[in-house]
Image: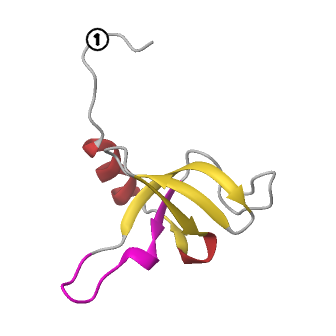
Amino acid sequence: MTATSGAPFKRGDYVVDEATRQRMPPEPAWVGRVQTVLDAGHVRLVTPHGAEWTARVENLTEAEASQRAAYDAAVPHRVGARR
């Protein structure tokens, strides 16, 4: 998973941002897809519903298959042909 900019992730990768995990109250880390590689240390992520945030690469891990499936299931799907 090497992008040309030197970042370990590339556009479209599913990642888990451990910096978003909370202990009190317990909340799992957010899963996002890489929208943009900003530089070797930062990427812009998007949730299934379109919220974006900037994350540090050092806080990211590759999402597991179950997390990728849950992300895809949460994406609102349009009716009709895609353009």
Whether residue 70 is in magenta: the answer is: no
The magenta stretch spans which residues? 14-27
Residue at the (45%, 66%) spot, across then down: 16
In the image: residue 17, left or right of residue 49 = right
Q: Position of residue 37 (x, y in %)?
A: 67, 53
Residue at the (24%, 77%) spot, across then down: 27
Q: Which residue lies under the disc numbered 1?
A: 80
Q: Position of residue 62 (x, y in %)?
A: 52, 64
Q: Position of residue 66 (x, y in %)?
A: 34, 58
- Helix or strand or loop: what does disc 1 sit on? loop
Residue at the (35%, 59%) spot, across then down: 67
Q: Quadrant of residue 20?
A: bottom left
Whether residue 15 is in magenta: the answer is: yes
> Considering only vertical position in the picture, is 82 above or below 8?
above
Q: Position of residue 61 (x, y in %)?
A: 53, 70
Q: Can residue 52 be spotted in the picture?
A: yes
Type of the residue with mark 1: Gly
> Considering only vertical position in the picture, is 65 above or below 24?
above
- Position of the N terminus, as image quadrant, is bottom right
Quick one: 2 or 50, which is closer to the camera?
A: 50
Residue at the (61%, 46%) spot, across then down: 11
- Position of the C terminus, as image quadrant, is top left
